[in-house]
Image: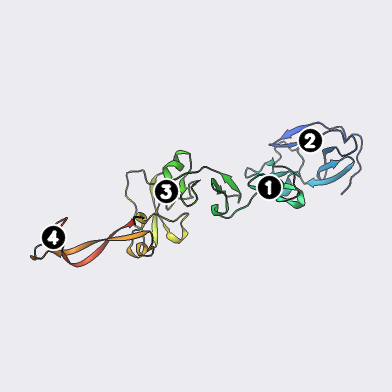
C-alpha cells in the first residue's frame, strides 16, 4: 500500500518506546528507512514508498498489544502485552536463536511451543506459548536455588513451579505426604506437600519411584522401579518368629511396603 505524504508528516523525530526502537526521520528520498503514524495505524517507509505495518502507533504512551499484528514490523507482542523489537527478516535464519520469521510482517517473533520438550535446553515453555530462558541444572535443589520450581533432569533444565504443585519436586519440609488413591502421587510446592494428589498421567514430569504409594503403580515401571515387601507371620526353621535381619524365613503372606529406584 503506497501513501502520498504531506510536508508536515515528514517532520518527525527519533523515539524509543516499550523496548521497540523505531526511527522517525526525514525521508530524504532514495532508500532511507523511516516511519510515521496515520489514523489507520503505523507505516514504514523506504524513501517515498510507504506500507502499512500495524494497527497501533507508538504515540500510544504504553504501546500495548494483544498479538503480533498490533505491533510495528520488526517487533512482536511480548507476554507483558508490550511491543518488543526483535528485528526484520525474510527467512528464519535471519532471526536470533529462539525466534522465527513471521514472513507476512517480515518480523522476527519468539518460537511457539506447547510443552517445554519443544524448547532448547535451558528454556521452558511459558504460558504464552513461547520458549523462555531459565537455567540448566542436575537436580531440584539447583533449580530451586536459582528461583525455579524443579529440575527436569531429562533436559537438565530449570522449570517454574507447576500450578498447584509438582509431582517431582524435592521435598524439604518436615511433613508427611497425603495418602493418594491408586494411580496418583502427592503434589509438592515450595518444598512442601500441598496435601493434594495428581493423577500420574497428568503429572508435569514423571514422579520418582519413591513417590509411588501403590504396588500396581510401582510394578508398572519395570525398568526404573522395584517393589519392596514386608513379610507377615514369618518363622524360621525352628518354627519361632523371625527377627529383623534373620534369613531363611518362611512367611504366610507379603504386604507391599514401598517403591524404590532400581540401582543402575
Marks 3 and 4, how far apart at CA:
38 Å
Front position in the image: 45 or 238? 238
- Within 10 Å of disc 1 (Cα), the crowding (few <14, some 14-19, many 20+) is many
Left or right? Give the position of 171 relative to 98: left
Q: Identify whether 199 is placed above or below 70.
A: below
Q: Identify whether 99 is placed above or below 58.
A: below
Left or right? Give the position of 13 relative to 173: right
Q: Nearer the N terminus, badge 3 or badge 2?
A: 2
- Within 10 Å of disc 3 (Cα), the crowding (few <14, some 14-19, many 20+) is many
In the picture of the structure, the residue carrying the numbered disc 3 is 169
Marks 4 and 1, how far apart at CA:
69 Å
Q: Nearer the N terminus, badge 3 or badge 1?
A: 1
Left or right? Give the position of 51 relative to 182: right
Label ID, residue 109: 1
Query: Could you say where residue 181 lies in the image, as x and y percent from the top left?
Result: 36, 61
The residue that appears at 73% across and 49% down in the rendered structure is 69
Marks 3 and 1, how far apart at CA:
32 Å
The label nearer to you, 2 versus 4, is 4
Secondary element type, mark 4: loop
Q: Nearer the N terminus, badge 2 or badge 4?
A: 2
Marks 1 and 2, how far apart at CA:
20 Å
Query: Could you say where residue 86 lies in the image, as x and y percent from the top left?
Result: 69, 42
- Within 10 Å of disc 2 (Cα), the crowding (few <14, some 14-19, many 20+) is some
Label ID, residue 242: 4
**Do tag 3 and tag 1 residues touch (Cβ < 8 Å)?**
no
- Within 10 Å of disc 4 (Cα), the crowding (few <14, some 14-19, many 20+) is some
The picture quadrant where one finds residue 263 is bottom left
Screen quadrant of the C terminus? bottom left
The residue that appears at 40% across and 44% down in the rendered structure is 191
**Do tag 1 and tag 2 residues touch (Cβ < 8 Å)?**
no
In the picture of the structure, the residue carrying the numbered disc 2 is 23
Q: Nearer the N terminus, badge 1 or badge 2?
A: 2
Amino acid at each position: 500500500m503506497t501513501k502520498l505524504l504531506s510536508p508536515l508528516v515528514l517532520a518527525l523525530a527519533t523515539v524509543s518506546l516499550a523496548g521497540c526502537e523505531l526511527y522517525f526521520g526525514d525521508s530524504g528520498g532514495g532508500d532511507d528507512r523511516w516511519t510515521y503514524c496515520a489514523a489507520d495505524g503505523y507505516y514504514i517507509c523506504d524513501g517515498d514508498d510507504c506500507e502499512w505495518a500495524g494497527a497501533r502507533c507508538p504515540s500510544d504512551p504504553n504501546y500495548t498489544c494483544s498479538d503480533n499484528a498490533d505491533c510495528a514490523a520488526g517487533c512482536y507482542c511480548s507476554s507483558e502485552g508490550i511491543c518488543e523489537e526483535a528485528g526484520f527478516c525474510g527467512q528464519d535464519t535471519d532471526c536470533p536463536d529462539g525466534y522465527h520469521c513471521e514472513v507476512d510482517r517480515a518480523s522476527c517473533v519468539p518460537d511457539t511451543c506447547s510443552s517445554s520438550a519443544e524448547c532448547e535446553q535451558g528454556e521452558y515453555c511459558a504460558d504464552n506459548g513461547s520458549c523462555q530462558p531459565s537455567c540448566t541444572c542436575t537436580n531440584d535443589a539447583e533449580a530451586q536455588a536459582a528461583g525455579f520450581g524443579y529440575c527436569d533432569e531429562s533436559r537438565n533444565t530449570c522449570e517454574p513451579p507447576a500450578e498447584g504443585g509438582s509431582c517431582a519436586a524435592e521435598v524439604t519440609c518436615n511433613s508427611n505426604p497425603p495418602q493418594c488413591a491408586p494411580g496418583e502421587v502427592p503434589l509438592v510446592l515450595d518444598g512442601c506437600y500441598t496435601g493434594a494428589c495428581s493423577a500420574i498421567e497428568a503429572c508435569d514430569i514423571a514422579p520418582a519411584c519413591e513417590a509411588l504409594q501403590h504396588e500396581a503403580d510401582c510394578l508398572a515401571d519395570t525398568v526404573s522401579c522395584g517393589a519392596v515387601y514386608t513379610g507377615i507371620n514369618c518363622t524360621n526353621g525352628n518354627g519361632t518368629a523371625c527377627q529383623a535381619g534373620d534369613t531363611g524365613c518362611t512367611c504366610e503372606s507379603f504386604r507391599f511396603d514401598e517403591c524404590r529406584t532400581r540401582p543402575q
